[in-house]
Amino acid sequence: MSFRIERLALEHLNGAAAVLVGAYSGPPWNENWSLEAAVENVKTVLETPRSIALAAIDAGKVLGIALGIRQRRHAGPVIYLDELSVLPEAQGRGIGTALLSAVFETAKAEGCNSVWLVSQRDGALSKFYQRCGFAVGGNLGLYSKSSA
């Protein structure tokens, strides 16, 4: 399988949304995304100024996406990687690694000093991010409040 990493364009919006739906439908997330919700998620990042939205594409099909939002922190601009998703049938082929590397290089080229993300602290995803050079924030917690 050959693929290329490119900036995500509106013409690939539905393909990018399908990646989210597929990637989150199985373990470890088991989330039931609607295509409508996924389109809204991707479109929000595309419409955010100075965001980084990349796609892995093979023969016109979106296989994976990386969606990052630029933020200003005390030490300078950073990219918060909101989504890194690869279609289940395309996982294990280097697509996620290539997307993560491309996000980091794009962020650096655009003047950002780091990329950060939220994911599982343990398990395969944690090991993947650590292999890609990310470190677990030892003193950070994820807090959430829901109306449901």
Image: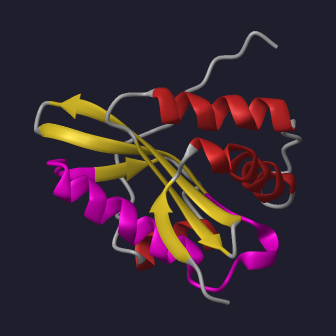
Vertical position of residue 38 compared to residue 112: above or below: above
Which quadrant is the C terminus positioned in?
top right
What are the residue bounds of the magenta stretch?
85-114
The reply to whether residue 127 is visible in this rendering is no
Which residue is at the far top? Answer: 147
Which residue is at the far left? Answer: 75
Residue 62: image quadrant is bottom right
Residue shown at the point (43%, 28%) measured from the top left: 48
Residue 88 located left or right of residue 91: right
52 falls in the magenta region: no
113 falls in the magenta region: yes
Q: Position of residue 21 (x, y in %)?
A: 81, 49
How are the colours assigned in the image? Answer: secondary structure
**As rendered, which of 54 and 69 lies closer to the eye?**
54
The reply to whether residue 40 is visible in this rendering is yes
Q: Position of residue 127 (x, y in %)?
A: 52, 74
Secondary structure that dominates the magenta span: helix
| Number of numbered callouts drawn | 0
Residue shown at the point (64%, 47%) measured from the top left: 11
Residue 39 located left or right of residue 107: right
Q: Position of residue 35 (x, y in %)?
A: 84, 38
Residue shown at the point (34%, 63%) measured from the top left: 135
**As rendered, which of 6 and 126 lies closer to the eye?**
6
Vertical position of residue 99 compared to residue 16: above or below: below
Vertical position of residue 70 compared to residue 118: above or below: above
Residue shown at the point (12%, 38%) measured from the top left: 76
Which quadrant is the N terminus positioned in?
bottom right
Vertical position of residue 90 compared to residue 54: above or below: below
Q: Position of residue 10 (x, y in %)?
A: 60, 41
**As rendered, which of 41 and 6 lies closer to the eye?**
6
Residue 111 located left or right of residue 28: left
